Image (cartoon, grey):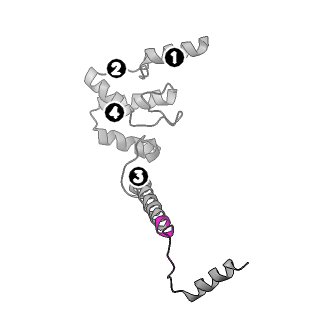
Amino acid sequence: MLASLALVVSLISGQGYAPVRPAVDPLDQQREQRVMRLGKKFRCAVCQGVAISDSPASMARAQLDKVRELVAQDRSDEEIETYFIARYGEWVLLEPKKDGLNAFLWLGPVLLLGVGLVVILSQVKKKTVATVPVEAPASDDFLAQVRADLDKP
């Protein structure tokens, strides 16, 4: 219980931002905010579901320091993203690009939902059509014979 309380206190006090390593000087406030914003785009290779700006792993610290270094060199966001994609592959992006095969993967669930709705609606329509009782014509000789046979003792 005490350990979980200590964990909660440390997470709250950290506010989701990892501390800057002592060897790296922080940038001015505007560029440091840009570093943290860019750090939210890249996946930590150790934690895998966490952004490098939120991860306590040493590899994530090194990646965030690299982002800080590139921002200090006045590189654009696209150049920094290209650098990380070239080094780690598109997997490093927490939100993959929405083009090429990825576009199909982004649209796939929506298309599946649409197909599912069409199938469900067609099944409901068939069910309502099938449950409507069909009246037999009154002059059907065969039906009259069957009823007569059923009435016999």
Q: Secondary structure at mark 1?
A: helix
Q: Which mark is residue 8?
A: 1
Q: Magenta residues, as a range?
A: 127-136
Query: Looking at numbered disc 3 in the image, what kind of residue is underneath it?
Result: Trp
Q: CA distance from mark 3 to mark 2?
A: 37 Å
Which residue type does callout 2 highlight? Pro
- Identify the disc placed on residue 60: none
Q: Is there a contact, CB below 8 Å, between mark 1 and mark 2?
A: no
Figure check: 82 above or below 13: below
In the picture of the structure, the residue carrying the numbered disc 3 is 106
Name which residue lies at 50% across and 65% down.
Answer: 127
Q: CA distance from mark 3 to mark 1?
A: 35 Å
> What residue sits 36% from the left and 54% below the top?
99
* Element assignment for label 2: loop
| Mark 1: few/some/many CA within 10 Å (<14, 14-19, 20+) | few
In the rendered view of the protein, which quadrant contains the N terminus? top right
Find the residue positioned furthest to the bottom: 141
Which of marks 1 and 3 precedes in the sequence?
1
What is the three-letter code of the residue carrying label 4?
Answer: Leu
Q: Residue under circle 2? A: 26
Q: Quadrant of the C terminus?
A: bottom right
Query: Image point 30% across, 26% down: which residue?
Result: 33
Q: Is residue 128 magenta?
A: yes
In the depicted view, which residue is nearer to us: 16 or 122?
A: 122
In which quadrant of the rendered view does residue 22 lie? top left
Drawn side of residue 33 relative to residue 107, left or right: left
